Amino acid sequence: LNGIWNHLLKGISDSRKISINDLTSIADSMSIRKADDALKYKFVDKLFYKDEMLAELNTKLGNSGDDKPNFIGLTKYSKAPRKAEKFSKNKIAIIYAVGEIKSGEGDEKTIGSEGISKAIREARLDDNVKAIVLRVNSPGGSALASEIIWREVVLAKMAKKPVVVSMSDVAASGGYYIACAADKIVAEPNTITGSIGVFGLVPNMKGFFNNKLGISFDYVKTNKHSDFGSVSRPLSASEKEFYQTDVEYVYQTFIGHVATGRKMTVAQVDSIGQGRVWCGVDAKRIGLVDELGGIDKAIEIAAKLAKLDSYRILNLPKQKDPFSQIMSKLSGDLDDVMLKSQLGDNYHYFEMIQNMSNVKGVQARLPYDIKIN
Protein backbone atom coordinates (compact mmCIF):
# COMPACT_ATOMS: atom_id res chain seq x y z
CA LEU A 1 0.00 0.00 0.00
CA ASN A 2 2.75 2.45 0.89
CA GLY A 3 4.53 1.80 -2.42
CA ILE A 4 1.35 2.58 -4.38
CA TRP A 5 0.47 5.54 -2.15
CA ASN A 6 3.92 7.12 -2.51
CA HIS A 7 3.72 6.78 -6.30
CA LEU A 8 0.30 8.48 -6.32
CA LEU A 9 1.56 11.24 -4.03
CA LYS A 10 4.50 11.99 -6.30
CA GLY A 11 2.27 12.05 -9.38
CA ILE A 12 -0.18 14.48 -7.81
CA SER A 13 2.63 16.57 -6.35
CA ASP A 14 4.38 16.91 -9.72
CA SER A 15 1.22 17.70 -11.70
CA ARG A 16 -0.49 20.03 -9.22
CA LYS A 17 2.68 21.63 -7.81
CA ILE A 18 1.74 20.78 -4.21
CA SER A 19 4.37 19.47 -1.82
CA ILE A 20 4.10 15.87 -0.62
CA ASN A 21 4.03 17.09 3.00
CA ASP A 22 1.04 19.33 2.20
CA LEU A 23 -0.73 16.50 0.38
CA THR A 24 -0.25 14.18 3.34
CA SER A 25 -1.53 16.84 5.73
CA ILE A 26 -4.59 17.48 3.51
CA ALA A 27 -5.36 13.75 3.36
CA ASP A 28 -4.91 13.15 7.10
CA SER A 29 -7.04 16.15 8.09
CA MET A 30 -9.71 15.47 5.43
CA SER A 31 -9.45 19.13 4.50
CA ILE A 32 -11.18 18.67 1.16
CA ARG A 33 -14.87 17.97 1.67
CA LYS A 34 -16.49 20.47 -0.71
CA ALA A 35 -15.81 21.77 -4.19
CA ASP A 36 -14.68 25.10 -2.69
CA ASP A 37 -12.06 23.21 -0.66
CA ALA A 38 -10.74 21.51 -3.79
CA LEU A 39 -10.29 24.93 -5.41
CA LYS A 40 -8.70 26.40 -2.28
CA TYR A 41 -6.08 23.65 -2.06
CA LYS A 42 -5.38 23.73 -5.85
CA PHE A 43 -6.80 20.28 -6.55
CA VAL A 44 -8.94 21.85 -9.30
CA ASP A 45 -8.48 25.00 -11.40
CA LYS A 46 -12.06 26.26 -11.70
CA LEU A 47 -15.57 25.52 -10.53
CA PHE A 48 -18.05 25.11 -13.41
CA TYR A 49 -21.68 24.30 -13.93
CA LYS A 50 -22.25 22.01 -16.91
CA ASP A 51 -23.39 24.85 -19.21
CA GLU A 52 -20.25 26.83 -18.29
CA MET A 53 -18.06 23.82 -19.00
CA LEU A 54 -19.67 23.35 -22.43
CA ALA A 55 -19.14 27.04 -23.19
CA GLU A 56 -15.47 26.71 -22.19
CA LEU A 57 -15.07 23.68 -24.46
CA ASN A 58 -16.66 25.55 -27.36
CA THR A 59 -14.26 28.43 -26.82
CA LYS A 60 -11.26 26.11 -26.86
CA LEU A 61 -12.59 24.32 -29.96
CA GLY A 62 -13.28 27.56 -31.78
CA ASN A 63 -16.99 26.74 -32.11
CA SER A 64 -19.69 29.34 -32.40
CA GLY A 65 -22.19 29.67 -29.57
CA ASP A 66 -24.78 27.47 -31.32
CA ASP A 67 -22.41 24.60 -32.04
CA LYS A 68 -22.17 21.66 -29.67
CA PRO A 69 -18.95 19.74 -28.98
CA ASN A 70 -18.89 16.21 -30.34
CA PHE A 71 -18.28 13.68 -27.58
CA ILE A 72 -17.04 10.10 -27.70
CA GLY A 73 -17.47 7.60 -24.89
CA LEU A 74 -14.44 6.23 -23.06
CA THR A 75 -15.15 2.68 -24.24
CA LYS A 76 -15.10 3.70 -27.92
CA TYR A 77 -12.08 5.91 -27.36
CA SER A 78 -10.12 3.05 -25.77
CA LYS A 79 -10.95 0.83 -28.75
CA ALA A 80 -9.88 3.38 -31.35
CA PRO A 81 -7.35 1.84 -33.77
CA ARG A 82 -3.68 2.54 -33.35
CA LYS A 83 -1.95 4.76 -35.89
CA ALA A 84 -2.16 3.23 -39.34
CA GLU A 85 0.37 0.45 -39.72
CA LYS A 86 2.38 0.17 -42.90
CA PHE A 87 1.84 -3.18 -44.53
CA SER A 88 4.52 -5.57 -43.42
CA LYS A 89 4.69 -9.33 -43.32
CA ASN A 90 6.48 -9.03 -39.99
CA LYS A 91 4.18 -9.37 -36.99
CA ILE A 92 4.32 -8.90 -33.24
CA ALA A 93 1.86 -11.23 -31.53
CA ILE A 94 0.05 -9.85 -28.47
CA ILE A 95 -1.26 -12.72 -26.36
CA TYR A 96 -3.82 -11.76 -23.73
CA ALA A 97 -3.71 -13.81 -20.53
CA VAL A 98 -6.53 -12.53 -18.33
CA GLY A 99 -8.10 -14.03 -15.20
CA GLU A 100 -7.55 -17.02 -12.93
CA ILE A 101 -5.12 -19.64 -14.24
CA LYS A 102 -6.77 -23.03 -14.70
CA SER A 103 -6.33 -26.25 -16.61
CA GLY A 104 -8.19 -26.59 -19.90
CA GLU A 105 -9.11 -24.20 -22.68
CA GLY A 106 -10.21 -21.24 -20.54
CA ASP A 107 -12.34 -18.38 -21.81
CA GLU A 108 -12.38 -14.58 -21.94
CA LYS A 109 -12.42 -14.44 -18.12
CA THR A 110 -9.92 -17.22 -17.30
CA ILE A 111 -6.47 -18.28 -18.44
CA GLY A 112 -6.69 -21.87 -19.63
CA SER A 113 -3.36 -23.72 -19.79
CA GLU A 114 -4.35 -25.35 -23.09
CA GLY A 115 -5.82 -22.21 -24.65
CA ILE A 116 -2.93 -19.86 -23.85
CA SER A 117 -0.31 -22.53 -24.61
CA LYS A 118 -1.92 -23.00 -28.01
CA ALA A 119 -1.81 -19.23 -28.66
CA ILE A 120 1.89 -19.00 -27.70
CA ARG A 121 2.65 -22.07 -29.81
CA GLU A 122 0.78 -20.59 -32.79
CA ALA A 123 2.88 -17.44 -32.54
CA ARG A 124 6.08 -19.48 -32.14
CA LEU A 125 5.41 -21.57 -35.25
CA ASP A 126 4.35 -18.62 -37.42
CA ASP A 127 7.42 -17.55 -39.39
CA ASN A 128 5.99 -14.06 -39.83
CA VAL A 129 5.73 -13.51 -36.06
CA LYS A 130 9.06 -12.05 -35.00
CA ALA A 131 8.29 -11.27 -31.35
CA ILE A 132 5.67 -11.99 -28.69
CA VAL A 133 4.13 -9.66 -26.12
CA LEU A 134 2.38 -11.55 -23.32
CA ARG A 135 -0.16 -9.26 -21.66
CA VAL A 136 -0.82 -10.61 -18.15
CA ASN A 137 -3.62 -9.59 -15.80
CA SER A 138 -3.92 -12.43 -13.31
CA PRO A 139 -3.74 -13.17 -9.58
CA GLY A 140 -2.51 -16.68 -10.46
CA GLY A 141 -4.17 -20.01 -9.92
CA SER A 142 -3.21 -23.62 -10.59
CA ALA A 143 0.53 -24.23 -10.24
CA LEU A 144 0.37 -27.09 -12.76
CA ALA A 145 -1.42 -24.94 -15.35
CA SER A 146 1.14 -22.16 -14.75
CA GLU A 147 3.98 -24.63 -15.36
CA ILE A 148 2.48 -25.67 -18.70
CA ILE A 149 2.23 -22.05 -19.87
CA TRP A 150 5.74 -21.27 -18.55
CA ARG A 151 7.10 -24.09 -20.72
CA GLU A 152 5.58 -22.57 -23.85
CA VAL A 153 7.23 -19.24 -23.06
CA VAL A 154 10.58 -21.02 -22.74
CA LEU A 155 10.03 -22.82 -26.07
CA ALA A 156 9.27 -19.48 -27.76
CA LYS A 157 12.56 -18.07 -26.47
CA MET A 158 14.38 -21.20 -27.67
CA ALA A 159 12.91 -20.49 -31.12
CA LYS A 160 14.77 -17.16 -31.02
CA LYS A 161 11.58 -15.14 -30.73
CA PRO A 162 11.84 -12.37 -28.13
CA VAL A 163 9.15 -12.56 -25.46
CA VAL A 164 8.20 -9.40 -23.56
CA VAL A 165 5.67 -9.47 -20.73
CA SER A 166 3.37 -6.50 -20.20
CA MET A 167 1.80 -6.55 -16.73
CA SER A 168 -1.60 -4.96 -16.23
CA ASP A 169 -3.34 -4.43 -12.85
CA VAL A 170 -2.17 -7.72 -11.34
CA ALA A 171 0.48 -10.23 -12.39
CA ALA A 172 1.15 -12.10 -9.18
CA SER A 173 1.97 -15.65 -8.10
CA GLY A 174 0.94 -17.79 -11.08
CA GLY A 175 0.72 -14.55 -13.06
CA TYR A 176 4.41 -13.99 -12.30
CA TYR A 177 5.16 -17.70 -12.82
CA ILE A 178 4.14 -17.47 -16.50
CA ALA A 179 6.02 -14.18 -16.88
CA CYS A 180 9.37 -14.92 -15.28
CA ALA A 181 10.98 -16.62 -18.30
CA ALA A 182 10.45 -13.62 -20.60
CA ASP A 183 13.33 -11.66 -22.10
CA LYS A 184 11.93 -8.45 -20.61
CA ILE A 185 9.16 -7.67 -18.11
CA VAL A 186 7.31 -4.35 -18.20
CA ALA A 187 4.94 -3.36 -15.38
CA GLU A 188 2.83 -0.36 -14.52
CA PRO A 189 4.07 1.52 -11.42
CA ASN A 190 0.97 0.33 -9.53
CA THR A 191 0.91 -3.24 -10.83
CA ILE A 192 0.48 -5.80 -8.04
CA THR A 193 3.14 -8.43 -8.69
CA GLY A 194 5.47 -10.88 -7.00
CA SER A 195 3.65 -13.18 -4.57
CA ILE A 196 6.22 -15.84 -5.39
CA GLY A 197 4.76 -18.54 -3.21
CA VAL A 198 2.35 -21.48 -3.29
CA PHE A 199 -0.19 -23.05 -0.97
CA GLY A 200 -2.48 -26.04 -0.75
CA LEU A 201 -5.97 -26.06 0.68
CA VAL A 202 -8.02 -28.96 2.07
CA PRO A 203 -11.18 -27.80 3.89
CA ASN A 204 -12.06 -29.63 7.12
CA MET A 205 -15.87 -29.56 7.27
CA LYS A 206 -16.34 -32.29 9.89
CA GLY A 207 -17.55 -29.84 12.54
CA PHE A 208 -19.94 -28.20 10.09
CA PHE A 209 -21.46 -31.53 9.00
CA ASN A 210 -21.64 -32.89 12.56
CA ASN A 211 -22.74 -29.82 14.50
CA LYS A 212 -24.80 -27.87 11.98
CA LEU A 213 -26.34 -30.58 9.82
CA GLY A 214 -26.23 -33.59 12.15
CA ILE A 215 -24.40 -35.67 9.53
CA SER A 216 -21.60 -38.08 10.40
CA PHE A 217 -19.54 -40.32 8.11
CA ASP A 218 -18.37 -43.93 8.17
CA TYR A 219 -15.56 -45.13 5.93
CA VAL A 220 -14.80 -48.35 4.10
CA LYS A 221 -11.41 -48.29 2.39
CA THR A 222 -8.72 -50.62 1.16
CA ASN A 223 -5.70 -48.61 2.29
CA LYS A 224 -4.76 -46.20 5.03
CA HIS A 225 -4.95 -43.08 2.84
CA SER A 226 -7.61 -44.10 0.31
CA ASP A 227 -9.76 -41.14 1.39
CA PHE A 228 -6.89 -38.65 1.42
CA GLY A 229 -8.24 -35.14 0.84
CA SER A 230 -11.77 -35.84 2.04
CA VAL A 231 -13.44 -32.71 3.43
CA SER A 232 -15.43 -34.76 5.96
CA ARG A 233 -12.48 -35.26 8.33
CA PRO A 234 -9.25 -33.47 9.31
CA LEU A 235 -5.94 -34.46 7.76
CA SER A 236 -3.77 -36.72 9.85
CA ALA A 237 -0.24 -35.62 10.80
CA SER A 238 1.31 -37.85 8.11
CA GLU A 239 -1.10 -36.55 5.47
CA LYS A 240 -0.25 -32.95 6.37
CA GLU A 241 3.40 -33.88 5.93
CA PHE A 242 2.67 -35.40 2.49
CA TYR A 243 0.86 -32.25 1.43
CA GLN A 244 3.55 -29.96 2.84
CA THR A 245 6.21 -31.88 0.90
CA ASP A 246 4.26 -31.34 -2.32
CA VAL A 247 3.86 -27.62 -1.59
CA GLU A 248 7.58 -27.23 -0.85
CA TYR A 249 8.46 -29.06 -4.09
CA VAL A 250 6.28 -26.73 -6.18
CA TYR A 251 7.73 -23.68 -4.40
CA GLN A 252 11.31 -24.81 -5.10
CA THR A 253 10.39 -25.33 -8.76
CA PHE A 254 8.81 -21.85 -8.88
CA ILE A 255 11.78 -19.99 -7.40
CA GLY A 256 14.12 -22.03 -9.60
CA HIS A 257 12.29 -20.80 -12.70
CA VAL A 258 12.40 -17.21 -11.44
CA ALA A 259 16.12 -17.49 -10.66
CA THR A 260 16.86 -18.75 -14.18
CA GLY A 261 14.63 -16.21 -15.91
CA ARG A 262 15.78 -13.21 -13.90
CA LYS A 263 19.45 -14.27 -13.70
CA MET A 264 19.41 -14.38 -9.92
CA THR A 265 20.41 -17.02 -7.39
CA VAL A 266 17.74 -19.20 -5.82
CA ALA A 267 18.63 -17.68 -2.43
CA GLN A 268 18.09 -14.16 -3.82
CA VAL A 269 14.67 -15.11 -5.18
CA ASP A 270 13.73 -16.79 -1.89
CA SER A 271 14.69 -13.63 0.00
CA ILE A 272 12.13 -11.59 -2.00
CA GLY A 273 9.72 -14.50 -2.45
CA GLN A 274 7.87 -16.46 0.25
CA GLY A 275 4.60 -14.93 -0.90
CA ARG A 276 5.66 -11.29 -0.57
CA VAL A 277 3.68 -8.87 -2.73
CA TRP A 278 5.23 -5.84 -4.45
CA CYS A 279 3.98 -2.88 -6.45
CA GLY A 280 5.56 -2.28 -9.86
CA VAL A 281 7.95 0.43 -8.63
CA ASP A 282 9.36 -1.80 -5.88
CA ALA A 283 9.41 -4.86 -8.17
CA LYS A 284 11.70 -2.94 -10.54
CA ARG A 285 13.95 -1.94 -7.65
CA ILE A 286 14.44 -5.57 -6.53
CA GLY A 287 14.89 -7.00 -10.02
CA LEU A 288 11.54 -8.69 -10.70
CA VAL A 289 10.68 -6.12 -13.39
CA ASP A 290 12.86 -4.47 -16.06
CA GLU A 291 10.89 -1.39 -17.12
CA LEU A 292 7.90 0.65 -16.02
CA GLY A 293 5.23 1.37 -18.60
CA GLY A 294 2.19 0.05 -20.42
CA ILE A 295 1.59 -2.27 -23.34
CA ASP A 296 2.89 0.30 -25.86
CA LYS A 297 6.23 0.28 -24.04
CA ALA A 298 6.29 -3.53 -24.18
CA ILE A 299 5.57 -3.51 -27.93
CA GLU A 300 8.33 -0.95 -28.46
CA ILE A 301 10.83 -3.15 -26.57
CA ALA A 302 9.71 -6.27 -28.46
CA ALA A 303 10.21 -4.50 -31.81
CA LYS A 304 13.68 -3.37 -30.75
CA LEU A 305 14.67 -6.88 -29.61
CA ALA A 306 13.43 -8.32 -32.90
CA LYS A 307 15.15 -5.52 -34.88
CA LEU A 308 11.89 -4.50 -36.57
CA ASP A 309 11.33 -1.13 -38.24
CA SER A 310 7.82 -1.96 -39.42
CA TYR A 311 5.38 -4.59 -38.25
CA ARG A 312 1.74 -5.48 -37.79
CA ILE A 313 -0.03 -6.55 -34.61
CA LEU A 314 -1.52 -10.02 -34.31
CA ASN A 315 -3.92 -10.43 -31.38
CA LEU A 316 -4.20 -13.89 -29.82
CA PRO A 317 -6.10 -15.97 -28.78
CA LYS A 318 -8.36 -15.27 -31.74
CA GLN A 319 -11.66 -13.71 -30.71
CA LYS A 320 -15.04 -15.19 -31.55
CA ASP A 321 -16.77 -13.71 -34.58
CA PRO A 322 -19.64 -11.30 -33.73
CA PHE A 323 -22.34 -13.89 -34.50
CA SER A 324 -20.74 -16.45 -32.16
CA GLN A 325 -20.50 -13.80 -29.44
CA ILE A 326 -24.22 -13.00 -29.79
CA MET A 327 -25.14 -16.69 -29.64
CA SER A 328 -22.90 -17.12 -26.61
CA LYS A 329 -24.71 -14.26 -24.86
CA LEU A 330 -28.04 -15.92 -25.66
CA SER A 331 -26.89 -19.20 -24.11
CA GLY A 332 -24.46 -19.83 -21.24
CA ASP A 333 -23.26 -16.25 -20.76
CA LEU A 334 -26.80 -14.95 -20.26
CA ASP A 335 -26.77 -16.05 -16.61
CA ASP A 336 -23.63 -13.98 -15.99
CA VAL A 337 -25.13 -10.94 -17.70
CA MET A 338 -28.25 -11.20 -15.53
CA LEU A 339 -26.21 -11.66 -12.35
CA LYS A 340 -24.04 -8.65 -13.16
CA SER A 341 -27.10 -6.49 -13.72
CA GLN A 342 -28.62 -7.64 -10.42
CA LEU A 343 -25.50 -7.59 -8.23
CA GLY A 344 -23.74 -4.55 -9.70
CA ASP A 345 -20.40 -3.92 -7.97
CA ASN A 346 -21.05 -6.90 -5.69
CA TYR A 347 -20.67 -9.27 -8.67
CA HIS A 348 -16.93 -9.20 -7.94
CA TYR A 349 -17.51 -11.05 -4.66
CA PHE A 350 -19.72 -13.67 -6.30
CA GLU A 351 -17.04 -14.24 -8.94
CA MET A 352 -14.35 -14.54 -6.24
CA ILE A 353 -16.36 -17.17 -4.32
CA GLN A 354 -17.04 -19.04 -7.56
CA ASN A 355 -13.34 -19.10 -8.43
CA MET A 356 -12.24 -20.25 -4.98
CA SER A 357 -14.83 -23.04 -4.93
CA ASN A 358 -13.21 -24.48 -8.06
CA VAL A 359 -9.67 -24.52 -6.61
CA LYS A 360 -7.91 -27.86 -7.14
CA GLY A 361 -4.38 -28.96 -6.29
CA VAL A 362 -1.44 -26.80 -5.21
CA GLN A 363 -2.07 -23.12 -5.98
CA ALA A 364 0.32 -20.41 -7.12
CA ARG A 365 -2.16 -17.65 -6.38
CA LEU A 366 -2.61 -14.52 -4.31
CA PRO A 367 -4.40 -15.86 -1.22
CA TYR A 368 -6.55 -12.71 -1.15
CA ASP A 369 -7.98 -10.15 -3.56
CA ILE A 370 -6.69 -6.57 -3.49
CA LYS A 371 -8.97 -3.65 -4.30
CA ILE A 372 -7.38 -0.20 -4.08
CA ASN A 373 -9.94 2.48 -3.12
Image (tube, grey):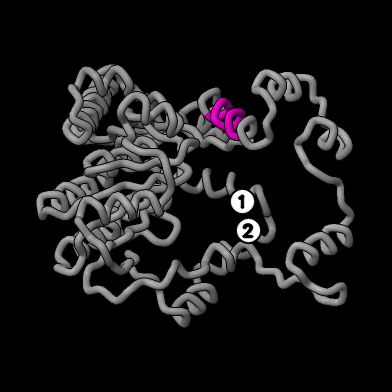
Q: Position of residue 157 (x, y in %)?
A: 15, 49
- Residue at the spot x=79%, y=43% of the render? 45
Position of 330 relative to 245 (above/below) = below
Instruction: Give the residues drawn in magenta, as a range.
Output: 4-11
* Precedes in sequence: disc 1 or disc 2: 2
Looking at the image, which residue is at 10% across and 55% down?
159
Q: In this view of the protein, can residue 363 be seen by the observer?
A: no
Q: Amino acid at mark 1?
A: Tyr
Whole-percent x and y of residue 201?
38, 32
Query: How far across and how far down the image is residue 242, in percent?
Result: 22, 24
Side (left or right) of 200 relative to 213: left
**Residue matched to label 2:** 340
Please tell me whether residue 363 is drawn above or below residue 341 in the rendered image. above
Residue occupying the far bottom of the picture: 323
Q: Residue furthest front?
A: 62
The answer to which of 112 and 74 lies nearer the viewer is 74
Q: Quadrant of the C terminus?
A: top right
Return the residue at label 1.
Answer: 347
Prevailing secondary structure of the magenta residues: helix
Pick the front one: 261 or 174 = 261
Q: Is residue 29 left or right of residue 372?
A: right
